[in-house]
């Protein structure tokens, strides 16, 4: 399994913000230069630590959205939680040139490397697409021919993160299927409901093809998708899950 | 700490609870769910709990045997390595002391093992002496599958990944060995008050 047994000490590094990208009205990507970044695997995350001038500190975890190949542009994609403590700072206050502390990479289970093969099946809800984007970017950077599909649920097309880039990836052999659960543009011909068992049956490779499945999103989506996949006959050991959701962030 | 994040003010801790929050943690009111794969659903009729490894005769309980053991209500704060803490959580469970009663073992460590293949390692001293339970109830209700039901290990003084969901037994070991998350760089012991999140902390 890729990335097992990372046992080196994780030290705090001071990252410098190099670029800010507004992905949606509520979501911003923070691209950083991290001195001596030790490298990461697609799917890993970092801990971010913020310090106020009176010494007060708080920490949060964010998935890395950039691929391992983008060595000088570590990207975190942050969704603003309205009453959150950290995400409003990262999405509204942070400026290019600011410095923030982080350490990582962390986690070695919810990761994918081209050497792991496929077919690669990614299922995302909302900002749960972030670590999965690192996997698709990694696949593209390595010009991998591993078959890959992304099933992505958003409330509306305005809420869909990485819209243009997903369109481009779709033209490069990634099967991108979107479902819009609340609002659709005129003429929308795609799915218009929450991800359910019949949608999974239509979009996911059959169990006999043994896809490697990564599911990331809010807990209800992750629970229902993982459960439906097991019911459809997929091997539970090939389904990896990660949660994203407002937990005070 | 000389580093200051420009423009960050932060929300101050609730002073009334400040002494109950370990470093780097923040309070939540909901109960977040974290797990690495699909939630297993083991029916009580198929469920057993075992003590294996370094003991003369392995022990085993069926669900009914287990539920017939004396249980207690446990109220504790819990701390997840992903930074959230939850105060005064109320559990129903059987003390690990009860399960190890009469066991003679040279073991110093245990490996908790679970449905779904999850494992986590702990010193024997940290699951005995009234510090750990096999919990089957939460907040007055049967423990839900997504929170580890039918039963999970509860070791509230360590980070919550040590409180293994869907637990099916404890393997007694002479030597320490890494469990699932510990293999991926998480701390072997995991004391939230020492902020032992990752290897080397």
Image (cartoon, grey):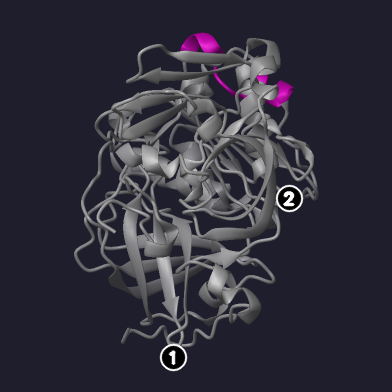
Q: Which of A79 and B15 is in front in this view?
A: B15
Left of B17 or right of it: where is A114? left
Of the pair A165 and B168, the residue shown nearer to us = B168
Q: Where is residue A36 in the image (x, y as percent from the top left)?
A: 19, 64
Query: In this picture, is B132 found above or below A104?
Result: above
User: Please, is residue B107 above or below residue B197 in the view?
Assistant: above
Which region of the structure is painted magenta?
A197-209
> Is label 2 in a helix, a strand or a loop?
loop
Residue that sits furthest to the front in the current view: B102
Q: Is residue A212 visible?
A: no
The CA span between labels 1 and 2 is 38 Å
Q: Does the magenta stretch include residue A207?
A: yes
**Residue B187 visible in image:** yes
**Local crowd at mark 2 within 10 Å, few (<14), some, or many (≥20)?**
some
Residue A51's spot in the image, x, y percent? 43, 81
- Badge number at residue A53: 1
For residue A74, side relative to residue A80 (left or right): left
Label 2 sits on residue: A155
Evaluate whether label 1 is on the same chain as label 2: yes
Residue A249 appears in which quarter of the rendering? bottom right
Check the picture and name the quadrant holding the C terminus of chain B.
bottom left
């Amino acid at each position: 399994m890729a990335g097992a047994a990372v046992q080196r000490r994780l030290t705090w590094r001071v990252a410098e913000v190099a670029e800010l990208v507004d992905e949606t009205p509520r979501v911003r990507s923070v691209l950083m230069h991290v001195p001596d970044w030790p490298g990461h695997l697609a799917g890993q995350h970092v801990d971010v630590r913020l310090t106020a001038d009176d010494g007060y500190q708080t920490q949060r975890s964010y998935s890395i959205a950039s691929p391992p190949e983008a060595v000088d542009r570590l990207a975190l994609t942050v969704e603003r939680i309205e009453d959150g403590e950290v995400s409003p700072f990262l999405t509204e206050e942070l400026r290019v040139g600011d410095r923030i502390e982080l350490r990582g990479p962390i986690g070695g289970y919810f990761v994918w490397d081209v050497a792991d093969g496929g077919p690669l099946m990614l299922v995302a809800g909302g900002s749960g697409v972030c670590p999965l984007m690192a996997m698709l970017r990694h696949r593209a950077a390595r010009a991998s021919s591993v078959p890959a599909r992304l099933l992505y649920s958003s409330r509306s097309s305005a809420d869909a993160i990485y819209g243009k880039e997903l369109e481009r990836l779709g033209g490069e052999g990634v099967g991108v299927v979107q479902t819009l659960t609340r609002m659709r543009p005129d003429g929308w011909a795609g799915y218009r409901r929450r991800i359910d068992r019949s949608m999974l049956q239509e979009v996911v490779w059959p169990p006999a093809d043994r896809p490697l499945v990564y599911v990331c999103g809010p807990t209800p989506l992750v629970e229902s998708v993982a459960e439906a996949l097991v019911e459809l006959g997929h091997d539970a050991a090939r389904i990896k899950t990660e949660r994203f959701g407002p937990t005070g962030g | 700490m000389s580093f200051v994040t420009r423009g960050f003010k932060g929300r101050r801790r609730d002073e009334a609870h400040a002494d109950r929050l370990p470093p780097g943690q923040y309070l939540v009111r909901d109960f977040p769910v974290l797990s690495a794969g699909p939630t297993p659903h083991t029916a009580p009729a198929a469920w057993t709990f075992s003590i294996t490894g370094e003991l003369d005769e392995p022990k085993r309980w069926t669900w009914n045997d287990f539920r017939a053991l004396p249980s207690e209500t446990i109220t504790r704060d819990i701390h997840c390595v992903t930074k959230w803490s939850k105060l005064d959580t109320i559990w129903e469970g059987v003390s690990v002391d009860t399960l190890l009663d009469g066991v003679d073992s040279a073991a110093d460590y245990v490996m908790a093992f679970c449905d779904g293949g999850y494992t986590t390692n702990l010193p024997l001293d940290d699951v005995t002496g009234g510090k750990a339970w096999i919990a089957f109830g939460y907040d007055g209700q049967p423990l839900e599958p997504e929170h580890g039901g039918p039963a999970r290990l509860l070791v509230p003084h360590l980070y919550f990944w040590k409180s293994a969901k869907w637990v099916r037994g404890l393997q007694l070991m002479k030597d320490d060995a890494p469990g699932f998350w510990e293999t991926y760089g998480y701390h072997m012991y995991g004391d939230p008050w020492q902020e032992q999140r990752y290897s080397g902390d």
